[in-house]
Amino acid sequence: MKILITGATRAGKSTLIRTLTNGKSISVDKHGTTVALDHGVITVKGIKLYLFGTPGLEHFSVLRKILSEGADGIIFVVDSEDRSKDSLARLVWREISTLAPSIPCIVAANKQDKPNARKPSDLRRELRFLSGVPIIPTSAKDNFNLNVLMNSMLNILIGELSPLLKKIEKYSGVKEGIKKIMDDMKLDFAKIKSYLNWLEYRELVEVNWDNGTYTMKRELRELLNSANQPIF
Ligand SMILES: Nc1nc2c(ncn2[C@@H]2O[C@H](COP(=O)(O)OP(=O)(O)OP(=O)(O)O)[C@@H](O)[C@H]2O)c(=O)[nH]1
Ligand SMILES: [Mg+2]
């Protein structure tokens, strides 16, 4: 799945991707400021996440537009200490909300290692636009809570898809599974094909069009069946 990492400049997006990938990310930057993108791949609970970090400076909005295309989830990184970037954060937030509406989003209240870092509750009060979005306190520098951040992102993504995934799971590995799910969901072949293609592209199922079967990735099945415990 594709995860967009965005937010205002200096919030810690590149650092977040670097830490998450143990330094194996690719960054296109000039003197430490991202001018194109950051990219890295990680696996969370067996699910592959393709991370794309955007630039944060206002004038790079075209790059944010290109990078946000097809994103399945968004991590919005905020500098919890530096209030001078709040208005830029609001601007980038508005931009992304328009570019990628209704994409599941989670906020990283970053730089919590700093003494004057605002807590999530402070940010909620000061940055009204974050209303209704989960906020996880993090330090990209110290690798604090990044596992919680990514697990939460994954849980939200799977949660959004779970009604469809539960149906898909029912006929995973079953003979004539594609035909059976079409009958069960009362959908035509084109629709089921688009769902399965979508999931296959995200490496969540493997489809054998020749014999009309598919299998859901084992790790995804485990995730779906693990009790849906609250995460916040
Ligand atoms: N103390 C502290 N510093 C951080 C943290 N995350 C990032 N930084 C520092 O903040 C500065 C900016 O970090 P970047 O990761 O380059 O920020 P960015 O969001 O990618 O910035 P742009 O590419 O300009 O949009 C760097 O000096 C980082 O070392 C953190 O969690 N704690
Ligand atoms: Mg950057």
Image: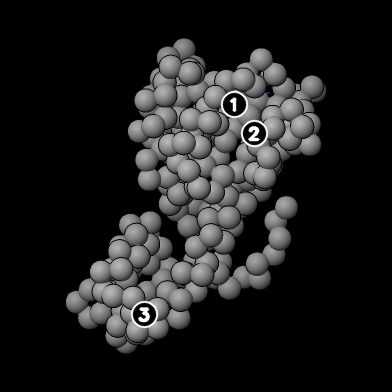
- Look at 42% across and 24% down and name the residue there: 61
Say if 30 sits above or below 46 in the image: above
Instruction: Return the x and y of residue 154 as percentages of the image width and height.
Output: 55, 54
Location of mark 2 (residue): 129
Instruction: Return the x and y of residue 128 as percentages of the image width and height.
Output: 69, 32
Label pair 2/1, CB-CB below 8 angstroms: yes
Q: What is the spatial separation of the Cα atoms under label 3 and label 1, in whole angstroms?
A: 43 Å
- Describe the colour scheme in one phrase: one colour
Q: Name the disc covering residue 186, or none.
A: 3
In the picture as drawn, the residue positioned furthest to the left comes out as 210
- Look at 56% across and 66% down and name the residue there: 223
Judge by depth and name the residue closer to the eye, 109 or 219.
109
Q: Type of residue at label 2?
A: Phe
Location of mark 1 (residue): 90
Q: Type of residue at label 1?
A: Arg
Left or right of 73 in this view: 210: left
**Is label 3's Cβ within 8 Å of ligand 1?**
no
> Could you tell which of marks 3 and 1 lies nearer the N-terminus?
1
> Could you tell which of marks 2 and 1 lies nearer the N-terminus?
1
Q: Type of residue at label 3?
A: Lys
- Look at 53% across and 31% down and name the residue there: 94
> Could you tell which of marks 2 and 3 lies nearer the N-terminus?
2
- Look at 23% across and 73% down and name the residue there: 209
Instruction: Return the x and y of residue 53 as percentages of the image width and height.
Output: 46, 33
Q: What is the spatial separation of the Cα atoms under label 2 and label 1, in whole angstroms?
A: 7 Å
**What is the secondary structure assignment of the residue under circle 1?**
helix
Judge by depth and name the residue closer to the eye, 231 or 189.
189
